[in-house]
Image (tube, rainbow, N blue to C red):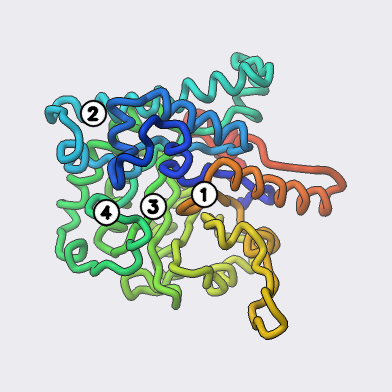
Amino acid sequence: MIRNDKILIDGDFETELRRHAEQGGKYIKDITLHALKNNQSAIYQTHLAYLRAGAQIIRTNTYRASLSDVLTHLDVEPGGYLPLIDDSVKLAKQAVVKYAEENGYDINSTYYQKSLKPLIAGSCGSYLISFLENMGNKWYVTLDVVRDLSVMEMINFHEPRMKTLLDANVDLLAFESIPTINEIQAILKLLTQYSQARACLSFLCSVDGKVDGYDLADIIRMCQRTLPERIIAFGIECVEPVVNPFLEMNLNQTIPLLLYGGKNEIYPVQRTSASDNRRVCNYVWEWLQCGICYIGGGIGTDAEDIKRIKRLIQIREGALSGGPSVSSNPCSNRNNENLSKL
């Protein structure tokens, strides 16, 4: 069953991290990796900032933390990799506890556990992310290097991080920026081996709604057939906000959809002159009207942008119900009652 309320996810981890990390401008690609080893306090503060902004799901700082990336950018032995992944979950959990304390929540109460507790998504990224220097280029790079990998090679890439995140008891997994069919197949095969795992999948799409040349609707149907009730949401990442085909798929409200809004989508586009033909619009507002269930911040967004999205959700839900509403705990692999709400 699809939820009628909206779930707010955090924003770009790297952008917010630079606000909390000393010498945040020193590193380009690898600031999130260096923070895992050298500045865990900044990771904790980043999670806390997103929780204070209203995020109900926070993602671990492991989007780019593949084994090869960690060994390339950090001075650690191979045996030090998995402890860093485990640390990333501990930091997110510490931020959740601190946020509860700030708000006077009884973290041991059933009500908090089922209705108020923010969820932690173990961020798994994608193979493509492991060799990008600039995240803004992910729509423009050739996918041949990814397509040439076998499903087993993809499984070997994802499994160490994924298993460690699950062993650390994250609530769900987040596979994002997935560009090719072989990687999708590998992720589905991995998830079948971990029966308690729940996940959200976000695909890298061309502007015509294709994923590696396949229709998005066909990709989603394949995932749903393979893992019914196990994938809590499907998302797309586009080079521009061309999401109509994606939204039209949900006219009967049967597919839980996820979108990450960049700054250009969060704030209304305004005409600058009488000759400006751009439509005055707020993409996030339109997404909410179209039934998007899960919404968060894309590249370049920070905690202030998540506050903005939260206000838009409250305005819309308040107009519909007579009062502001942002959803309670959306899912948990530790709680079957919460899973039944999906």
200 lies left or right of 70: right
From the viewer's perspective, is residue 143 above or below residue 102?
below
From the viewer's perspective, is residue 44 above or below residue 141?
above
Q: Which residue is mark 3?
A: 176
Residue in view at x 61 percent, y 42 percent: 341
Q: Identify the mark nearer the N-term, 3 or 4.
A: 4
Q: Residues at badges 4 and 1 in contact (C-beta under 8 Å)?
A: no
Nearest the camera: 27 or 11? 27
Q: CA distance from mark 4 to mark 1?
A: 18 Å
Q: Which residue is mark 2?
A: 82
> Which residue type does callout 3 highlight?
Glu
Residue 133 - label? 4
Q: Secondary structure at mark 3?
A: strand
Q: Identify the mark nearer the N-term, 4 or 2.
A: 2
Q: Quadrant of residue 100?
A: top right
Residue 301 - label? 1
> Which residue type does callout 2 highlight?
Leu
